[in-house]
């Protein structure tokens, strides 16, 4: 949890494939292994899977919601490696100009469609 989302109570579940991660992570394999162990000890249907939600930025552009993750790289890896399809998130609405603070001049590249990577049509919220 970050300062930006510490007071946010709403948890959303996003398809893992819908979250763009523009920064290549530096990973600690031991940390990922511990997170995988935590996930394996929880009921797959449980809302609380033992890991904190990942902060995800949402930009609304051209009628679509675009999701970006800049932190939580170890949690993303743990979810991916255990075959989870959705990720527990705290979604922070931002503008395109706010996103530019993270990615600079490459912000326009962030909104290009990728094959099999269209933004989701719906998000499950709790």
Image: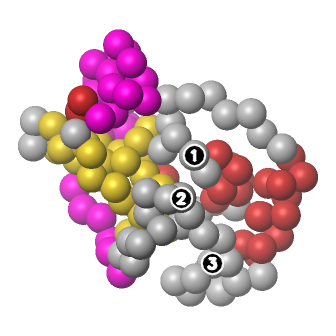
Vertical position of residue 25 compared to residue 71: above or below: above
Label 3, label 2: how many angstroms apart (C-alpha)?
19 Å
> Does residue 119 show up magenta in the picture?
yes
Q: Residue at x 67, y 34 (%)?
A: 25
Q: Residue at x 37, y 37 (%)?
A: 116
- Residue 45 visible from this viewpoint: no
Residue at disc 1, secondary structure: loop
Which of pointers 1 and 3 indicates the residue nearer the eye?
1
Q: Residue at x 86, y 46 (%)?
A: 29
Which of pointers 1 and 2 indicates the residue nearer the eye?
2
Magenta range: 98-126
Q: Residues within 10 Å of mark 2 (few under 14, many from 20)?
A: few
Which image quarter: residue 44? bottom right
What residue is pinned by disc 3? 49
What residue is pinned by disc 1? 71
- Residue 4 lies, in percent from the top left, at 43, 57
What residue is pinned by disc 2? 2
Is label 3 in contact with label 2 (beta carbons under 8 Å)?
Answer: no
Label 1, label 2: how many angstroms apart (C-alpha)?
10 Å
Residue furthest left as drawn:
63
Q: Which quadrant, please, contains the C terminus? A: bottom left
Residue furthest front as drawn:
3
Q: Residues within 10 Å of mark 3 (few under 14, many from 20)?
A: some
């Amino acid at each position: 949890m970050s300062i930006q989302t510490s007071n946010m109570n709403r948890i959303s579940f996003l398809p893992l494939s819908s979250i763009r991660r523009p920064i290549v992570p530096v990973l600690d394999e031991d940390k990922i292994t511990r997170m995988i162990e935590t996930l394996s000890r929880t009921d797959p249907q449980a809302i609380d899977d033992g890991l904190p939600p990942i902060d995800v930025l949402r930009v609304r552009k051209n009628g679509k919601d675009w999701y970006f993750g800049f932190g939580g790289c170890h949690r993303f890896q743990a979810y991916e490696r255990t075959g989870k399809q959705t990720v527990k998130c705290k979604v922070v609405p931002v503008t395109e100009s706010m996103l530019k603070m993270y990615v600079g001049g490459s912000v326009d590249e962030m909104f290009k469609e990728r094959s099999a990577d269209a933004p989701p049509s719906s998000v499950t919220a709790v």
